[in-house]
Amino acid sequence: MMTSAPTSRLGGTTTSSSAREARELYELKQQAVKFYQDNLVPQRMEQVLNDMFYENPEDVYGHLAGYFQQFAKPPTVSQVTVLEAADCRGQPTIQAELHGVVNNVDKVLCTVTVPTTNWDTPLTEEEEAEKAESLKVAMEYLAGPITEALSGTEVANQREGDQRVKNFIAKVLEDFEEELKAKKAKEEEESPRAPTPKAAPSEKGGKGKKGKGSATSVIIPPQPKEELPHGIQAVSAASLALLEAGAQASRQPLYSHVAALRTGEVSSKLRIPLPMVCVYHGGKAGPGKLNCIKELLIMPKPGLPFKEAMRMLTNIHNQMGKSLAAKSGVTARNTTDLGAYAPQYDKLEQPLDLVQEALAALELQAGEDVHMAINCAAHEMFELEKGKYEVMTGTQKTPDDMVDFYSDILTRYPGVIGLIDPLRKQDKTAWVKLTQAVSEKCYLMGDQVYPRTEKFLVQGMEETKSSAAVFSLHSLTTVTDVIDAAKLVEDVGSEVVLAACQGDTADTTLTDLAVGLWVKFAKFGGLGRGERVAKYNRLAQIEARLADQDKLAPHEEHKFPDILPPPPPEEPEGEAAD
């Protein structure tokens, strides 16, 4: 049976479907109104349109995009992709790409290539296989668990992102330590008891019966070598990528972003660190008999513009090359992977005199125009069986002898104002004696005397207090670790040195990190390698930008931090012995 269509009050007819559509349209409009009002779109549209009419920008839509960008959600991490790259030695390393969601679009935010860890001698086949396996695991970590850990993290939140990565790696380290314990326990069960270690030979008394006044023999503890699991390179790779992406998100230069992470606010002034340029690379693994100078570094005097300072240091480097070529042929100008010369030297005076000859030829004065520092690498020249430092092949010295040895160097070469790792961290008594002897006229810098940065944050300087601490960024170290470690050092009145690794890459992130951290010295290597020079060129570029913006802070004259031990307490009056 047919029914008539409903009649409207206005005299027209309509269907139930059209009424439903009208109601749905009305509800949809109400939802749209609420959506736009909740997100303040009408108010902001009104404001920007009114303001823009008076401002009359040349690029109308660019102005609108910039205005609304400030209200956009911050970029978040979506994934980390990784490729195998090569370091300065042609060895495999990690190149990480960090992807993020920006304005609802997923895209690559940055690419970083991380350095490999320090090593001087060629790797054995077994070591190469271990390194290859570690790299493979690191790449798997980045593409898998670390991507999961960072997913959704705001790229500008460096501390949170670093902590998420460290939470993952903490479980890896825990499992690895358990495996080590089980392995060592099994080895102890299967192997016979090890013989008691022999005591180091006494300085006095010689062989046979001890004479009166002979020194007591002391068993020298071995230099502990920390074993770490495969894949730890993923930590610094993820952290560096997050830092780069965070700078992009903050729309400020990388060095300014680092400064904001360090202080919590945008810094009004920044300074360029003093470059420590390596001009001689030797040490235990180098040619010749000289072991006590692994690196000879030159530095400009404070107050010199960086561009001018680098021109002077470059002239010194080139003059040294000319001198070496004239004495030993063109091949003597070849440089190592640190970008420094490596002639075969047998005496302490040879590299120091080479620098001073170059200075004289350029009419420069050591100690006035240019200063020097020595990376002694004491842990490498220490002979465990003898309990002595082999400063030159056949010349060995006790820890106490080393105090006089370094005092003599500083007396004969007043241009030397820095000693890096002059003693092992185990020789705490001798270290205190050295501070008493030379720390008022020289920086005593700690590198290998301290544990890796993550442990340094827990242990601090302990008994081995120095006037400067050297940090680098690789393996397990995150950007947050370096920021916190630098603050810890500054809080005790010492200086900070940021150093590049030997297996370096052309990535210049470390340069911006050095500026943002307000470090005193930057130790990036020599001037004979492109990846080293790239970092110095970046410092010159940053200096120019800061100068244009009137944000360049000067360096003060060298003031060696007070690291002398406190004097003994005075005895109260009346209690002194008769």
Image: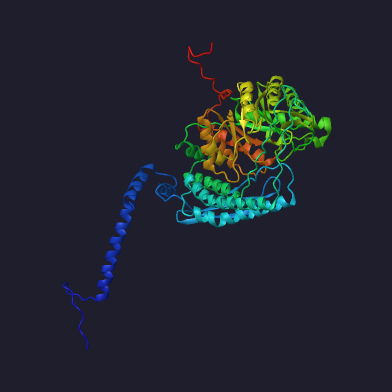
Q: Is residue 54 visible?
A: yes
Q: Residue at x 41, y 50 (%)?
A: 72
Residue 194 in the image: state x and y as whole percent: 70, 45
Q: Is residue 61 left or right of residue 112?
A: left
Q: Nearer the viewer, residue 283 or 64?
A: 283
Could you tell me which residue is drawn at 44 percent across and 47 percent down?
A: 59
Q: Residue furthest bottom?
A: 1
- Quick check: can you spot residue 255? no
Is 390 rendered above or below residue 412? below
Quarter of the image holding residue 223? top right
> Which residue is drawn at the image coordinates 70% and 30% (left, top)?
217
Q: Is residue 542 above or below residue 554?
A: below
Residue 368 found in image quarter: top right
Q: Residue lying farthest front?
A: 209
Identify the image quadrant of the C terminus.
top right
Q: Going by the image, does 526 lie left or right of 208?
A: left
Along the viewing direction, whichever of 329 and 117 lies nearer the viewer? 117
Out of 472 and 308, give the one closest to the viewer.
Answer: 472
Q: Is 361 on the left-hand or right-hand side of 36? A: right
Q: Position of residue 20 (x, y in %)?
A: 26, 72
